[in-house]
């Protein structure tokens, strides 16, 4: 492990000041960062510990939205009664991820920033454009069973690992980002970037910027939402395919819908084509099958991951059926 400095800060101003020094990185739960530092994949020269910032509350807002502090632990968020009743898909997605111990440490902001589980990225022996731009990609012609079938580029086919972020896409969440010159608010669908020619850039966060909050709009979906995660084992495993869905019904007709995919794309993936199929259609199995087909129309499989197309379709159908019965 490379040498680094460590400092605790107690307010946002201090955090932003420290983050401007050298190759500094914020640390909160540390559940991804510390692993990657041990592997020499992340090599910050300074760790700025932000656990002392007052960003650990889940607050009701006067407009009906909910504001989640960036330091709210994943476990606390998943078990919050407001989240369970009004944003069920978010609670289900978080509880499908990691282990109880990790969820008790991992934070809302850190979850958004977690990095891919591509095994070539995590092993510096292999070439990886995400770890070292221009080095090549060992996964393209390597063993790519866990890799992306949506949103890939010629430089990177790594999947985004978060369950929580997929649910946030289905809920039209926004991310609040603080910089030295003010705050900006980014829709969750624009927060993560496609790899394109710069797979090392994964989010719109610029050096020295800090995630402060995530907001959930009151929205029309309420509790009629669900998350289905399919993986190699039943717990403590990343998704091979997952679906977060939310439905607004008018009688037995879908008035509006959100469909997002995880485990199959290079970023949390909003499936607009599926939403179009659902909107105005009868809420039944035939519609759900059509929506699942639409969600995967743009999929491009690699040598070992064509199975993900059918797997993701089944996740979509099951999630829609679950949401209907909630
Ligand atoms: Fe690196 Fe992306 Fe290739 Fe994995 S898929 S080896 S993360 S460039």
Image (cartoon, grey):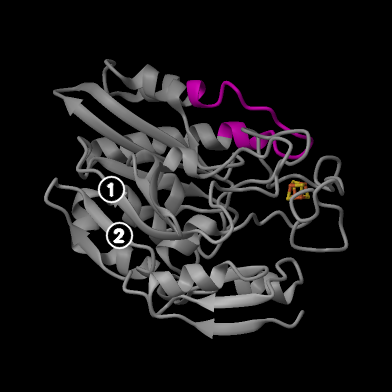
Q: Position of residue 264 (x, y in %)?
A: 59, 40
Q: Can residue 289 be spotted in the picture?
A: no
Is residue 226 magenta-colored?
A: no
Instruction: Say above or below: 4 vs 35.
Output: below
The magenta segment: 293-310
Q: Position of residue 9 (x, y in %)?
A: 45, 80
Is residue 298 magenta-colored?
A: yes
Q: Which residue is drawn at 38% across and 63% down?
A: 70
Image quadrant in which you'd find residue 305: top right
The residue sitting at the front extreme is: 181
Among numbered discs 1 and 2, the one appearing first in the sequence = 2
Asked which secondary structure carries label 1, the reply is strand
Q: Residues within 10 Å of mark 1 (few under 14, many from 20)?
A: many
Q: Residue at x 13, y 23 (%)?
A: 251
Q: Where is residue 99 in the image (x, y as percent from the top left)?
A: 48, 70
Asked which secondary structure carries label 2, the reply is strand
Q: Is mark 2 within 8 Å of ligand 1?
A: no
Dots 1 and 2: beta carbons under 8 Å?
Answer: yes
The residue that mark 1 highlights is: 216
Q: Where is residue 76 in the image (x, y as percent from the top left)?
A: 31, 69
């Amino acid at each position: 492990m490379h040498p680094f400095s460590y400092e605790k800060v107690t307010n946002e101003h201090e955090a932003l000041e420290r983050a401007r020094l050298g190759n500094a990185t914020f640390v909160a739960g540390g559940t991804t960062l510390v692993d990657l530092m041990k592997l020499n994949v992340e090599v910050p020269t300074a760790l700025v510990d932000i656990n002392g910032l007052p960003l650990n509350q889940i607050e009701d807002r006067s407009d009906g939205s909910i504001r989640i502090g960036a330091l709210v632990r994943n476990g606390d968020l998943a078990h919050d009664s407001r989240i369970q009743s009004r944003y069920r898909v978010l609670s289900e997605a978080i509880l499908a991820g990691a282990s109880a111990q990790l969820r008790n440490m991992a934070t809302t902001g850190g979850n958004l920033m977690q990095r891919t589980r591509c095994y070539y990225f995590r092993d510096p022996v292999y070439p990886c454009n995400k770890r070292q731009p221009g080095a090549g990609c060992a996964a393209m012609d390597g063993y790519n069973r866990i890799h992306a079938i949506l949103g890939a580029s010629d430089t990177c086919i790594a999947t985004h690992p978060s369950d929580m972020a997929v649910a946030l896409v289905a809920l039209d969440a926004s991310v609040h980002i603080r910089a030295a010159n003010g705050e900006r608010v980014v829709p969750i669908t624009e927060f993560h970037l496609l790899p394109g020619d710069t797979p090392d850039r994964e989010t719109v966060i610029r050096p020295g910027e800090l995630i402060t909050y995530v907001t959930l709009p009151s929205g029309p979906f309420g509790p009629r939402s669900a998350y289905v995660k399919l993986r190699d084992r039943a717990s403590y495993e990343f998704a091979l395919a997952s679906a977060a869905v939310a439905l607004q019904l008018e009688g037995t007709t879908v008035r509006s819908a959100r469909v997002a995919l995880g485990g199959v794309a290079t970023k949390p993936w909003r499936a607009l084509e599926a939403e179009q199929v659902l909107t105005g259609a009868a809420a039944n199995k035939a519609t759900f099958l059509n929506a699942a087909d639409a969600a995967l129309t743009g999929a491009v499989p690699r040598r070992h991951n064509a199975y993900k197309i059918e797997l993701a379709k089944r996740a979509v159908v099951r999630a829609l059926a679950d949401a209907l019965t909630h």
